[in-house]
Amino acid sequence: MSDTPTPPATAREWHLLSRPVGRPEPENFALVEAEVRTPGEGQVLVRNEYLSVDPYMRGRMSAAKSYVAPYELGKAMQGGAVGEVVASNAEGISAGDRVLHFLGWREYAVVDAKSAVKVDPSAVPLSAYLGVLGMTGLTAYAGLLRTASFKEGDSVFVSGAAGAVGSQVGQIAKLKGASRVIGSAGSDEKVKLLTEEYGFDAAFNYKNGPVSEQLRAAAPDGVDVYFDNVGGDHLEAAIGSLNRDGRIAVCGAISVYNNTEPAPGPKNLARLIQTRGRIEGFLVGDHYDLQPQFVEEVGAWIRSGELKYRETVVEGIENNLEAFLGVLRGDNTGKMIVKL
């Protein structure tokens, strides 16, 4: 494509310099200039247009063994990204194509073609492939429908409900016939968003009082499904309100990510015995077989306007770190996106 931009000799990327203890600080990171390489056999060079920052990235900044390898010190960090192919040395992908890949935190990326997914910028806005139709969207879909075994008529509680995953969980539950959907969020403004725009039946600000009391008031008949993005007191409250044969899908625990000491566990786990409750963790990577079904069903809801989403957009690679720190603080409504 003749109007594909010529790549520069160097471009900027974020490196992890040291592993944060507790809350990440700017001195743990550096924005550096790096050579823009020519793609080798089976590779493409991508000019990133949108970058994703997500809570799970905090875990990759630590050296502790986890489900995904830690970021390497002194090297570019990684994350979801979508952008334009400016040079291709791979069959099936041409200059001018838009692709989704996982070499974010940088302006230009040389990506193995086999790990790049072509996306259609005319179907939905390009940034949606990082959120509502991307990894966060599939997380919501798989966690609710498969891990939590959601069924029509269930009462559903979602923590972190104004975030990228939580807001989609609640809406999918409503679209699939939930009897009641309750969400928690960290501000009165977000609570209003949940009930007025996303169609939640009830929502509360967890800063306004004990979560267990607010949940009991919002769900007097208990909950059948709890989708956990937060952990801590939210998980304990959900166990306390869980109905017979209730299911809890553990997606994340953002409330404890920066803790330097282990957080105490819920004090009421024994209640799972009387409710015959089930609590199960999951990773989105185990559910990519749902991707075609997910894109078809959720894409249709987006186009029809039945499923709504918000993005918090921060501009400039230089603000990538601040956008990530903002996610940990809860600054975002919906998916946090960095636009380059």
Image (cartoon, grey):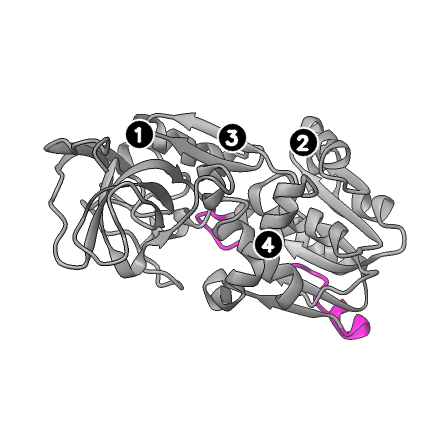
Q: Earlier in the sequence, mark 4 or mark 1?
A: 4
- The residue to which callout 2 is attached is 190
Do the residues under discs 4 and 3 have CB atoms within 8 angstroms? no
Instruction: Point out residue 147 in the picture as x, y percentages from the top left corner.
Output: 62, 67
From this view, report whether residue 123 is shown above or below residue 60. Answer: above
Front residue (pair 201, 69)? 201
Q: Nearer the viewer, residue 79 or 96?
A: 96
Q: Residue at x 30, y 38 (%)?
A: 48
Q: Are marks 1 and 3 in contact (CB under 8 Å)?
A: no
Label 3 belongs to which residue?
312
**Disc 1 marks which amino acid?**
Ile
Query: Amino acid type of disc 4?
Result: Ala
Q: Position of residue 185 (x, y in %)?
A: 67, 38
Question: Quick check: 178 left or right of 323?
Answer: right
* Mark 3 nearby-residue class (10 Å; few <14, some 14–19, many ≥20): some
**Which residue in the structure is indicated by mark 1?**
317
